[in-house]
Image (tube, rainbow, N blue to C red):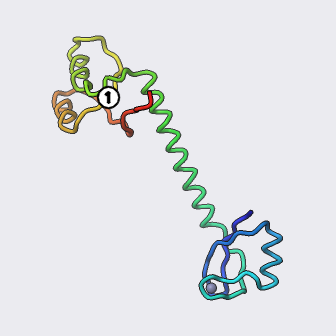
Amino acid sequence: MIVFDLKCADGHVFEAWFRDGETFDAQAAAGEVACPVCGDTAVAKAPMAPNVARKAQAREAERAARKLRALREHVEKTCEHVGERFPEEARKIHHGEVDKRGIYGEASLDEARALNEEGIEFGWLPFGPSHDS
Ligand SMILES: [Zn+2]
């Protein structure tokens, strides 16, 4: 199956599925392809740009998701998950009470603000805690 963006003589653009390009040519020539808006059978393939743009968008979203997964895997592999002890552990590391190491976990907005005010550096991860480990 193949999808075409079609355009009638009135300028309505719609999508239609065909077995292949030849089927479309034959059906269109026989007047069997009608515009769903006005019923016009003088339809032609519309420029593919909207479809191409959608595909590019989908690719972009996929790339972003892949990047996020990679970041998450990297963090989970190289940092210790301390869960809700994050603010406490971050403070200990900041004050040299424990060895400096990479940690990640959860903190409330208030806790994060407090850490920030204490000059403790941390970053936000664009994903929530993993529950599947
Ligand atoms: Zn139409």
Q: What residue appears at the point 30 percent right and 11 percent down from the top-left corner? A: 99
**Dot 1 lies on which element?**
strand
Q: Quadrant of residue 53?
A: bottom right
Q: Which residue is mark 1?
A: 105
Q: Quadrant of residue 114?
A: top left
In the image, residue 123 sits, relative to residue 95, either above or below, namely below
Q: Quadrant of residue 108?
A: top left
Nearest to the observer: residue 97 or residue 26: 26
Q: What residue appears at the point 46 percent right and 33 percent down from the top-left corner? A: 71
Mark 1 crowdedness (10 Å alpha carbons): few <14, some 14-19, many ≥20: some
Residue that sits furthest to the front in the current view: 132
In the image, residue 91 sits, relative to residue 55, either above or below, namely above
Name the side, left or right, on which 122 lies relative to 46. Answer: left
Q: Residue 81, percent across and down?
A: 35, 23
Q: Residue 20, percent across and down?
A: 79, 66
Name the side, left or right, on which 40 lies relative to 108. Answer: right
Q: Amino acid at mark 1?
A: Gly
Name the side, left or right, on which 1 lies relative to 120. Answer: right
Q: Residue 116, percent across and down?
A: 20, 32
Q: What residue appears at the point 25 percent right and 22 percent down from the top-left corner? A: 90
Nearest to the observer: residue 50 or residue 4: 4
Q: Residue 133, percent across and down?
A: 44, 27
